[in-house]
Image (cartoon, rainbow, N blue to C red):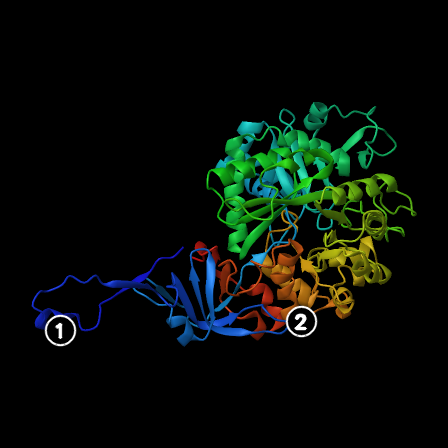
Amino acid sequence: MNKNWIPIALSGLALTGCFSEEAKEVEAVAEPLKVTAADKIYYGGDILTMSGDKPEYAEAVATLGEKIIYVGSKDGAMEHKFGKTQLVDLKGKTMLPGFVDPHSHVYGVGLQAMVANVLPSPDGEADNVAKIIETLKNAENNNTQRLFIEKTGWILGFGYDDAQLDYYPTKADLDKVSTDKPVLIIHTSGHLSVANSKALELAGITSESEDPKGGIIRRMENSQEPNGVLEENAHFAMLFNLNKLIDSELQDRMLEASQGMYAKYGYTTAQEGRATSEGYEAMKRASKNDKLMIDLVAYADMVSSSDFMDSEYNTPEYTNHFRIGGVKLNFDGSPQGKTAWLSQPYFHPPHGQDKDYAGYPTFEDQQAYDYVETAFKNEWQVLTHANGDAAIEQFINAVTKANEKLGKQDRRPVLIHGQTMRQDQVDRLAAQGIFPSLFPMHTFYWGDWHVDSVLGHPRADFISPTQAVRKAGLKFSTHHDAPVALPSSFRVLDATVNRTTRTDKVLGADQRVDTYTALQAMTIWPAYQHFEESYKGSIEVGKNADLIILDNNPMKIEPKALKDLNVEETISRGQSVYQRQ
């Protein structure tokens, strides 16, 4: 409790001392302040509160500790100014509430920061296979990447994107990097990888290996010999084993690096959207050691890691910036990787598949239904990755069955991605209480690929249908799914408003939304998604002092300039955690 006191002398004290025969000792009375003294008062710029259905501005904001104590006029804010109050003149810059990340993998972003960057432009330089090989060969010349190699014994790269490459890499390409060390590159979607011969040998993957359920080991043409490409559960098995080699020092460095990335882009809440036991232990350790500077909310991989759902961190409130929010399920794969489960065939099927290929599910229907019902019974919020419309249908059906059996409550099950959602499915989300977290950033990174290879028109035009969802009366959130791409808030904002591809074509013009709606999908609506709307997502008295300062007001610039915005400062619970240099 803040205890600022003003000593008040009794009136007439001096006179009493003059006219009485005996001076009497009188104690000064201390009364509490009628207003609370602020730590900081911000003013002098546009303060967009995000507290209403339409844009609302305040002249000033006052904060004390972790909380906002005043929002309103500058004169009103100055009533909270006392001796040590810091006055912060925004100098024409713009303040918003901190961005709330509705879906990504903060632990994976840390891994990405520790290994070779094989992303294509604009986020990397690996625009062809030769450049991937060169980048991996140079990994040992980078201090951070060399530490990872020394500790794990693996050369790892993250972010290859066959949609931007000259051809699909195989083990033969990665054998050019090393035949002694295992080499692995992870697809930008996070759902596929390519392993060299040594990595396949260590994993026991041979010509006699069968495809795991919900996954594929790609083969050499006219042969059973693996070509190094692993899809879905074949890939995840390799990755989960590699994760076990990452020691606590690497984990701590990963979380430090990833938090810095999120703060740079204005996120004051980040999500770990598929937490393994290793990731959970790392985040718990960081919380206990006061190493977290922004809030991290984790969703346990329900299939492999639901054992820590009985943790003391599984609460609605954060403990030293960390809590468990629920569980995560994966019902299919990646559309750009052509493993998402569609109801109709891919426009151009991947190599080795026939014209009727439409991807594949992770679970049989009954398994999917059982997992969702179990989550509901345990009162776990469930996030479900479903990209293809067949997987989305499976999720809607699973929620419908669980609601019919257990009764409808405010559980807020979340559809993650929903890339190829159909209009009839949009109409059924609200009826089942499903919250959509969409991925319109796909329109930039893979929009041309969706048109030319994955879906074709008109399916490609309807990916991440934000306008259709809004017209159905639904709130929604928008995400970057980092490390699929960098955790760039302004790429998310730009894609939601403009839906332009790499070649500057508009994909699905009728699914664009206005800038304010797009900002709601990054602030107050994802706070609602996480059951955190009472203390996050808008600038209001009593909410967390999670604030960001931008160089321009997104409401007052041309939509095409949104991607060029910059965060000047990020403030998490009243503490500055990032300042632009």
Answer above or below: position of 420 versus 227.
below
What residue is drawn where x is 65% and y is 28%?
Answer: 182
Answer above or below: position of 80 versus 115.
below
Q: Amino acid at mark 2?
A: Asp
Q: Total marks drawn?
A: 2
Q: Position of residue 183 (x, y in %)?
A: 65, 32
What quarter of the picture does the C terminus occupy?
A: bottom left
What residue is drawn where x is 22% and y is 63%?
Answer: 28
Q: Amino acid at mark 1?
A: Leu
Determine which of the numbered discs, if any, sits on residue 15 in the image: 1
Does the rendering let one see residue 146? no
Q: Position of residue 471 (x, y in %)?
A: 77, 69
Q: Position of residue 369 (x, y in %)?
A: 83, 43
Q: Is residue 405 left or right of residue 128?
A: right
- Which residue was labeled with disc 2? 514
Helix or strand or loop: what does disc 2 sit on? loop
Nearer to the camera, 349 or 317: 317
- Residue 88 lies in quadrant: bottom left
Q: Tell me the crowding category of disc 2: few under 14, some 14 to 19, or many 20 or more residues within 10 angstroms, Cα based.
A: some
